[in-house]
């Protein structure tokens, strides 16, 4: 039925259909994803919020083809791509920079993988590193960067990858609020320019509300979609949006829903 | 500053070697160990100063043999490790045969090599290769299979092909292991060459030693050993330098 | 413990043992030159027949391994060993205190051998052929002597170092002839049905009829315990005499002591070798001064040794039993 | 499920070995290779069925020797690596002597060992130890010095003593490297034992091979080699099992 | 002079005096700490806020004795302890769990180092793991935990260490807001019970205001103390403190100061 519907509608950039997954290690079973469905229309920005350990990163691993779900499918542009890799730009939760590459080469890695690490890419990477406060650290190895600097390098690496769909797993968690909002604004600018489709995991309701068109609230483990929140604010979003009463109201509502859920299943 | 660093890395081994030589010299004269059992460093030095000219030819021959054999052995070891790593089925099936290759002693192997390959350089290269490839292959396979999980996951998620994972993640990650294997192989390659020369040669340090053995010239044997050791140390040192140059990214052990 | 062991074996062979006492036997080691073969039969026979025990000795026959016997004996680690005239000569000129105390075989049974299909009938035929050896200057000098005496040119022989390969393997490829002991390799060729042509080196010059192998001891043992040397040689001499008189039984003794050896080869080799131990000498083990002198002169002339040999100290017949 | 896993890890090497034997058999009969040059597997099997009884004694002797030597060699290698790792000055000064130890050939070493240590088990154990300790020591030192920087920093910040850093971080981290070195050493220990027996023994596979060599019995030499290979494989397999058991924390290569 | 003074006053749990540090790598010099002084009175809770990459973690490394400052001293209880290790309980920015230890053993590590990993410690660790939502993961290896779960394990490891002074380097950055405030509340409870002295690095002004007695604002690299903010709210702090006008005012003020600083030196 669902399949029928989506074939009629214009294809989504990314559609996640009834994904379930259980980790099996020896005799232990840990159900992590429970019938998750969500969709990312082309050119849109969605966010995922859920308690720590509920299965968000695991969901990304399924989208990226790293893990095979027990049930359900991943569709991109209407095509079943479950288990296929290389279709998304990915910013992992841990920076995972390669210690033997300097920061510039790390930033260029994803571009290299798709064969586009030419002179122009180098220039672009340099410019972006400057923008992200990493100017002068092009030749520094990852162990010489601070935690937040590593995270920014990883973020740039993901942005420089050419794929349509971008999956960001808590990309700004180690940044101070100013650097963070600077990065957010920049991400929005880039996104508005290129109209790529973004899916973001975040623990910050503010961040989700500022950036996204839709927010999916996940339950505790095994993660299921608890709520889908459409963010009504017009774009481009105002700098002072966070003080808008509507914003605060929505924030409070999301907070309440999460709290309610967590009360049912304490973390 | 740089000079001082160099000096700091040179003097401890130098002191150790000199101490060792002094002890040796003292022991030989203290216990009246006869020259044909164990010559003293002084005896060896004397021999070196008078009889070294003829040894140069042998040294060159061995050097040529061992460098070629070492290069081929290392290449074979690496290629084998790469192939076996990329095709896990190959790995599990061929491992016993690789171990087998280390268990055919020269006295059984030498006649076979001679019959199949004659008396040229080929059978000798095969012997050195057999000696060298094994530590390289084992160390490389171990290093390759231990690539960091988080980085590996990233590479897969980013759509890296098997080849890209191999060249951009697994090889750089395995490099320290590989170099450790190559260091072992470099040390063995020298003895490998000597043994290869025992199974039939008309020049080289191994051949020279054999002759000196039959005429009780223990001092000359030890002179030959000194040359072997020098070559070995040089090889090891070169690999260690290469390692320093290749693996620059590491934080100095006690930086700041 | 030693007493116990000695008593047990003595008990089994009480007939052989004249002095059935509990007096402790003296432990003595003999180190061979190579793996056990029919050159060593007399030693095994003397042990098995109880001749050593009669002399109050508990003899242990040990293998030298890749280190060779000479260093063991010269250093005093082991009192007796099996060596070659050539080694003793070279060793002594380097200050190694080895002394030859008996010739195991009277005449040199080594020579140059080739499969018959190479049609090498005399040293003249070596020209244009390939010789497989181990690259020592002595080999080359011997080959040159032999060929010179036959009016042939040694420079027309191609030398190859065949290392670990044996005669049979070597002649399968590239190599035409090699230096062998007939008693072992030659007999094996007969057994295999691979007939060979052989030129014994002794046939070409008296100087090359040197002793191989010989029994050796070191100067220290001679000085400090001449009675031990005498006793050892008395028993050993009986052992070789037994081997001369009973080739088949002595072959069995060797095989029993070293069951890993090839039976056929040992028996055939023993039959061939037994008459050759004493041969034309007055008694087994006798060494002639001129043999030592000739060969060392020959070596010195060819610069195979750096200084002339003090022949009289290199060997002695003093410890052989009286006739 | 477990049984199936076992089977899956056994059949590829089994197939490879069987294929290898078939090829060998075919080659020997196809090219009419004579038995005393290279016996066929069938010849060896025949020899095994008739003459194996006497070999049992030799096998046991070698097994005893090599297990003892391997244990001592590994222990020496580990202790040396530990000492040299903990005292960096020792490391830089003693490394040349360690390499030197790998470059004294048996023909020079054997007489010395015999003279100093007699004909007992001691000189043989020394030879095996010399062969085994080196790969273990090099691999262990490399592994120890490559402990993760972030974890090391944590340990230091948390006030861990040198000893605690060593036992709780560096050793567990180096364990895979160490096991890789021990695997190499295990393989070498078998050849080491054979060589040790060549330098003087009255039993053991090495002794047996020497005698067969002098009696031109190539088929028996290869029977001995087959036994050596079997022992080697068993040793390697045991270390691999030990590795699986010790290093459980690793994610299965392709979990889920 | 300064030394005199502190000998007169009651000794602080931790005092940082004029610390300066420059990273020297080959020919490059990177000044990171610029004359930093701050003090942590016994039984107090202070926070450090500063832009990403300014030198906060480096300061912790100096306190912990991992790095030697170019100038300046670290004092504990009036004693000069510059370069001494083992005097603090430490929660690093990256979890740095040992992959070969299961989670329980990782949590017990710091206790083990001080020789106190007895049965009671095991029980305590188990109880705390339950409390932190890690119940059932005692035997799981770190790679089987989510990012936030690893962070919580690392946090517990630090809490279980017995030292007086606790240094927390962004301990809650990967946690969702509910889990985070749960952890915060718990940390406060523990701290109020035991009256250990805490120094916390955080990027969240809310967090700093809720938890601490004093907040130090650091400038961009090289980090210098920009401002010292004394937090006036009474303890125990109310749940709804974040909606208090005083709270919001202080938060806005801190935000403004940071913004002003960052405008001078763009990240
Ligand atoms: N080992 C090192 N070698 C050279 N430079 C280093 C090293 N460690 C840190 N740095 C530099 O020191 C500066 C401060 O790093 P630090 O980790 O202290 O920052 P931080 O304030 O903790 O930042 P974040 O909030 O991003 O964690 C950075 O610019 C970093 O590049
Ligand atoms: N390789 C694995 N093996 C077993 N269990 C795993 C594995 N990876 C993750 N898990 C479990 O799956 C659950 C979800 O993990 P996941 O990393 O997806 O959480 P998350 O939502 O991203 O949490 P966080 O916000 O803390 O990053 C966790 O309980 C974790 O223990
Ligand atoms: O943290 C947990 O959700 O278990
Ligand atoms: Mg996650
Ligand atoms: Mg930091």
Image (tube, coloured by chain):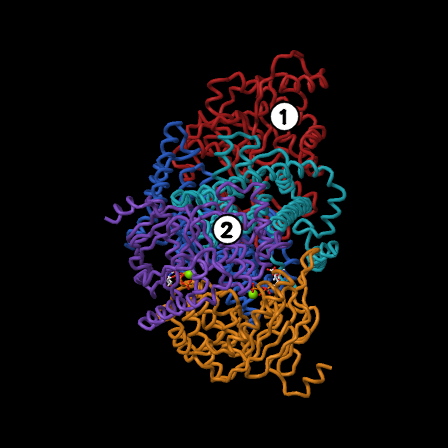
Chain colours: A orange, B blue, C red, D cyan, E purple
Q: Nearer the viewer, residue D178 or A233?
A: A233
Q: Quadrant of ligand 3?
A: bottom right
- Rendered position, D116 above or below C220: below
Residue at the disc numbered 2? E190
Q: Residue at x 39, y 78 (%)?
A: A123
The answer to the question of whether label 1 and label 2 lie on touching residues, with beta carbons closer than 8 A, is no
Q: Pinpoint the chain carrying mark 1.
A: C
Q: Which quadrant is home to the N terminus of chain A?
A: bottom right
User: How many numbered marks are there?
Assistant: 2
Q: Nearer the viewer, residue A68 or B17?
A: A68
- Rendered position, C135 above or below C255: below
Q: CA distance from mark 1 to mark 2?
A: 96 Å
- Say the numbered circle drawn on residue D234: none
Q: Which quadrant is home to the C terminus of chain A?
A: bottom right
Q: Pinpoint the chain carrying mark 2.
A: E
Q: Position of residue E19 (x, y in %)?
A: 31, 54
Q: Is residue E160 left or right of residue D10?
A: left
Callout 2 crowding tier (Cα within 10 Å): few <14, some 14–19, many ≥20: few
Callout 1 crowding tier (Cα within 10 Å): few <14, some 14–19, many ≥20: many
Residue at the disc numbered 1? C240
Q: Position of residue A140 (x, y in %)?
A: 38, 65
């Amino acid at each position: 039925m669902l399949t029928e519907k989506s074939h009629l509608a214009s294809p989504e950039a990314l559609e996640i259909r009834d994904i379930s997954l259980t980790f099996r290690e020896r005799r232990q079973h840990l159900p992590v994803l429970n019938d998750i469905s969500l969709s990312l229309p082309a050119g849109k920005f969605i966010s995922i919020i859920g308690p720590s350990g509920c299965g968000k990163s695991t969901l990304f691993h399924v989208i990226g083809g790293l893990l095979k779900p027990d049930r359900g499918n991943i569709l991109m542009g209407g095509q079943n791509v479950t288990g296929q890799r290389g279709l998304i730009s990915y910013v992992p939760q841990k920076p995972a920079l390669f210690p033997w590459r300097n920061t510039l080469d790390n930033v260029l890695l994803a571009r290299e993988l798709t064969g586009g690490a030419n002179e122009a890419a180098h220039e672009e990477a340099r410019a972006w590193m400057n923008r992200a406060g990493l100017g002068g650290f092009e030749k520094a190895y990852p162990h010489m960067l601070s935690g937040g600097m590593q995270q920014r390098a990883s973020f740039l690496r993901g942005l420089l990858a050419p794929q349509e769909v971008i999956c960001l797993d808590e990309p700004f968690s180690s940044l101070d609020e100013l650097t963070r909002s600077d990065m957010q604004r920049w991400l929005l600018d880039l996104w508005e320019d290129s109209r790529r489709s973004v899916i973001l995991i975040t623990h910050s309701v503010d961040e989700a509300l500022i950036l996204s068109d839709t927010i999916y609230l996940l339950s505790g483990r095994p993660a299921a979609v608890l709520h889908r929140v459409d963010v009504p604010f017009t774009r481009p979003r105002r700098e002072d949006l966070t003080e808008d009463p509507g914003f605060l109201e929505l924030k409070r509502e999301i907070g309440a829903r999460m709290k309610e859920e967590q009360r049912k299943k304490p973390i | 500053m740089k000079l001082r660093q160099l000096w700091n890395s040179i003097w401890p081994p130098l002191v150790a070697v000199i101490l060792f030589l002094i002890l040796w010299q003292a022991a030989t004269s203290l216990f009246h160990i006869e020259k044909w059992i164990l010559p003293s460093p002084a005896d060896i030095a004397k021999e070196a100063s008078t009889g070294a000219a003829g040894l140069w030819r042998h040294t060159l021959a061995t050097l040529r043999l061992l460098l070629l054999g070492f290069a081929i052995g290392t290449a074979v070891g690496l290629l084998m490790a790469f192939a076996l790593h990329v095709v896990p089925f190959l790995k599990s099936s061929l491992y016993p045969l690789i171990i087998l290759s280390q268990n055919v002693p020269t006295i059984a192997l030498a006649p076979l090599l001679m019959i199949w390959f004659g008396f040229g350089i080929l059978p000798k290269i095969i012997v050195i290769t057999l000696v060298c490839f094994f530590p390289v292959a084992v160390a490389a396979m171990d290093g390759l299979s231990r690539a960091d999980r988080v980085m590996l996951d990233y590479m897969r998620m980013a759509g890296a092909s098997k080849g890209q994972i191999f060249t951009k993640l697994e090889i750089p990650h395995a490099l320290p292991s590989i170099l450790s294997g190559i260091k072992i192989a470099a040390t063995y390659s020298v003895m490998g060459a000597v043994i290869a020369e025992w199974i039939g040669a008309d020049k080289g340090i191994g051949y020279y030693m054999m002759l000196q053995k039959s005429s009780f010239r223990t001092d000359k044997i030890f002179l030959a050993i000194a040359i072997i050791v020098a070559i070995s140390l040089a090889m090891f040192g070169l690999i260690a330098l290469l390692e320093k140059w290749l693996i620059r990214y590491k934080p100095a052990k006690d930086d700041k | 413990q030693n007493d116990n062991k000695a008593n047990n074996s003595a008990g089994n062979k009480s007939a052989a043992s004249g002095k059935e006492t509990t007096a402790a036997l003296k432990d003595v080691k003999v180190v061979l030159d190579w793996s056990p073969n029919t050159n060593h039969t007399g030693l095994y026979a003397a042990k098995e027949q109880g001749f050593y025990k009669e002399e109050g000795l508990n003899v242990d026959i040990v293998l030298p391994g890749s280190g060779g016997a000479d260093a063991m004996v010269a250093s005093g680690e082991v009192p007796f060993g099996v060596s070659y005239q050539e080694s003793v000569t070279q060793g002594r000129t380097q200050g190694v205190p080895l002394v030859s105390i008996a010739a195991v075989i009277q005449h040199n049974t080594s020579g140059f051998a080739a499969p018959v299909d190479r049609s090498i009938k005399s040293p003249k035929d070596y020209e244009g052929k390939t010789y497989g050896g181990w690259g020592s200057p002595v080999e080359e000098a011997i080959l040159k002597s032999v060929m010179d005496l036959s009016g042939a040119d040694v420079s027309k022989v191609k030398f190859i170092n065949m290392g670990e390969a044996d005669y049979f393997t070597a002649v399968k490829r590239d190599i035409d002839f090699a230096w062998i002991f007939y008693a072992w390799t030659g007999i094996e060729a007969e057994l295999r049905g691979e007939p060979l042509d052989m030129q014994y080196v002794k046939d070409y010059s008296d100087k090359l009829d040197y002793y191989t192998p010989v029994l050796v001891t070191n100067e220290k043992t001679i000085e400090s315990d001449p009675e031990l040397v005498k006793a050892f040689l008395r028993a050993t001499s009986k052992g070789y005499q037994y081997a001369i008189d009973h080739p088949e039984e002595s072959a069995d003794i060797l095989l029993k002591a070293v069951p890993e050896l090839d039976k056929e080869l040992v028996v055939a080799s023993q039959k061939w070798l037994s008459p050759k131990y004493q041969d034309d000498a007055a008694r087994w083990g006798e060494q002639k001064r001129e043999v030592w002198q000739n060969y060392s002169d020959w070596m010195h002339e060819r610069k195979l040794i750096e200084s002339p040999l003090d022949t009289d100290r290199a060997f002695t017949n003093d410890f052989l039993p009286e006739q």
